Image (cartoon, rainbow, N blue to C red):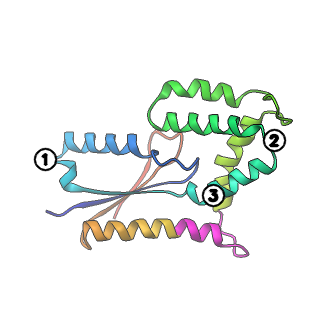
Amino acid sequence: MRKLAVLIIHGIEVDDPGLFDTALRKLREQFGSQARTAPEQALVVETVNWASVLEGPERDFLARHGTPDAEGYWQSLYDGIRAVNQGRESALVPLMLRMMRPSTRGMDQRYPGLRWLMVHFVGDIIAYQSNPADPDVYTAIHRKVAEALARLREKAGDTAPLCVHLAQPGQRHRQQLLL
């Protein structure tokens, strides 16, 4: 049976190993309800979360510009994002309230949660821009995508049609390419 190769790419956010769990479950449910073939037999899926390329430098940046007491606060924001990624929408309100605090005990910064948000979301967008003087980030991101495509080709075969899903936060309608 010919397989459909599916590549899901997402990068703006935090490095979250469980980022795609809910999306993959829903993809398989929808596919299973519409197709005459079980998703396990027809779909070969690979995911790419390129936020992992930037996670270390972003954490280092926050540590340099924060206080030692901030680590617990930063961790609560990471945990909140991961809970929302797992489909727990009820975690969104406490996360937003933590982010909107004007200050946090032991921290000298105003609105540290918004700073964290800017580093992890807007910072990813800025870092992704191609920079001929320093191509390392751009190259590392594209290397992750190329590695995922190679795994897909190995699992699905050379003749499998490829569907690329570019996941973008906050958009109901995602960009999809069927190649």
| Residue 176 horizontal/vertical position (percent) | 40, 54
The answer for how far apart the CA atoms under marks 2 and 3 are is 21 Å
| Residue 26 horizontal/vertical position (percent) | 33, 40
| Residue at 80% in and 51% down | 64
| Residue at 71% in and 44% down | 118
Q: Which residue is mark 1?
A: 36
Q: Can you tell which of label 2 and label 1 is closer to the viewer?
A: 2
The answer for how far apart the CA atoms under marks 2 and 1 are is 56 Å
Give the residue type that dot 1 points to: Arg
Q: Which residue is mark 3?
A: 54
Q: Can you tell which of label 1 and label 3 is closer to the viewer?
A: 3
| Residue at 84% in and 36% down | 109
Tell me if 6 is positioned left or right of 112 in this view: left
Above or below: residue 20 compared with residue 107: below
| Residue 68 horizontal/vertical position (percent) | 79, 42
Check if mark 2's residue and mark 1's residue have beta carbons within 8 Å: no
Looking at the rendered image, the quarter that the C terminus falls into is: bottom left
Which stretch appears magenta? 129-142
| Residue 155 horizontal/vertical position (percent) | 27, 66
Tell me if 54 is positioned left or right of 109 in this view: left
105 vs 110, nearest the viewer = 105
Q: Residue 51 is drawn in which quadrant? A: bottom right
Give the residue type that dot 3 points to: Leu
Above or below: residue 89 compared with residue 59: above
Badge 3 crowding class, 10 Å Cα cut-off, few under 14, some 14 to 19, many 20 or more, is many
Q: Which residue is mark 2?
A: 67
